[in-house]
Amino acid sequence: MVGLLVLLVVAGTGFALWAAQRVRRRDGTVAGVPEPSTAATPAAAVVAALDRAVAAGLLTRATADAVLAQESLAQAAAAPAAHRSHRPVLASAVEGLGYVGGVLVLVGVMLIVAQFWEDLATAARLVLIGGAGAGLLTVGLLLQAEEVPVVWRLRGFLLLLSAGAVAGTAAILMVDVVAAPGPVVALVIGSATGAYGAALWRRHDRPAQHLTTFIGLAVAVGAAGSWLGGSAATGALIAVLGLTWAALGRANRLAPRTVAIVLGTAAALVGPGIIAVAWPQAGPAIGLLLAAMFAATGPTLDEPVLTGCAVAGLLVYLPWAVGAVFGDAVGPPVVMVLSGAVLLIATVALVTRSKRNHPGVPAGSAPS
């Protein structure tokens, strides 16, 4: 439960920061798509050239005005349809319909299978779940205009839902057909889901498929660890996977890099929580050590997302570690409060001193 809490807090914080960065671009773009120009007027260079031609007697003013009028009409006609005033409303409606439609299809099929589970043959279960996944995949692949933000988001969402159908199909095959043991079932489900997500992702800027691939790998790695050595091995392997994934994201080997850093950091922090099942004191201590390491390297590497994830990990593992080591003793929490207060006072003093010594220079910036 604590590991799930860490994952939710860290992943939620990181995804929120990543979404904010993606929406607010310094160059005025949203999701990589330039903001449209609202004015359908000829370029200033064209107007200046016509004015010079009129002044030189090469053109009459009437002819120049006619050319400008024609150019304005041509630019208005060539403006992309998605940039016209009525399109945003239509685009939002289409996106909403796609989300609701995809959810209705998948949830409806799941309810049918659950309600008539005993009456359905294995083949019928596979056809229902697999058919829903195939339908969602087909619709997602038909949405080709990924340069449009609405289409980009809707495509990723539908493909994400189809990955759920793949996991369900793999589960039915392994449980009903093969009758495999639990760790093997989890290993196959994770491997199938991860491979499916990777095939759709292919290192492009597709966070939903990035998420699918990573979760599949994490499930497969966790199942392998459970098979080999119980919860301690499971937690250790997931932590190693997380550290590796975060490092690859930091090196720009996985896209989007911020998603890779968030998912990797979350998994690295979840691992010690799983280790704590076998080692109640060592697990929280390892988690606290990793969180402290992330908190120290985040500002050094100028990675705010890593710092935010580290803070979320500290909020979980610091009280857990203190409780595991000292129990109900009041001394350690009091020391923590006093130490934190001293650090905050020192921070304020350093910022104030920096502003006083270098007025006009932001704190943390070196004066020129």
Image (cartoon, rainbow, N blue to C red):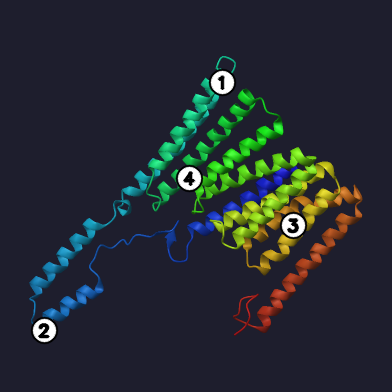
Disc 4: which residue: 156
Mark 1 nearby-residue class (10 Å; few <14, some 14–19, many ≥20): some
Identified by mark 1, the residue type is Thr
SS category of the residue bearing label 2: loop
Q: Earlier in the sequence, mark 1 or mark 2?
A: 2
Disc 1: which residue: 122
Q: Earlier in the sequence, mark 2 or mark 3?
A: 2
Mark 4 nearby-residue class (10 Å; few <14, some 14–19, many ≥20): many
Please name the residue shown 52% across and 28% down the image: 129
Depicted 127 relative to depicted 309: above or below: above
Looking at the image, is mark 1 or mark 3 nearer the viewer?
1
The quarter of the picture where the N terminus appears is: top right
Measured in 3D between alpha carbons, the distance from the residue under mark 4 to the one under mark 1, in whole angstroms, is 30 Å
Determine whether, in the image, residue 296 is placed left or right of residue 60.
right
Residue 2 appears in the figure: yes
The quarter of the picture where the C terminus appears is: bottom right
Which of the two residues, 301 or 99, is positioned nearer the viewer here? 301
Determine whether, in the image, residue 359 is placed left or right of residue 151.
right
Q: Tell me the tag on residue 291.
A: 3
Q: Earlier in the sequence, mark 4 or mark 1?
A: 1
Return the x and y of residue 243 as percentages of the image width and height: 69, 55
Mark 3 nearby-residue class (10 Å; few <14, some 14–19, many ≥20): many
Disc 2: which residue: 56
Measured in 3D between alpha carbons, the distance from the residue under mark 2 to the one under mark 4, in whole angstroms, is 58 Å
Return the x and y of residue 76 as percentages of the image width and height: 23, 58
Q: Earlier in the sequence, mark 2 or mark 4?
A: 2
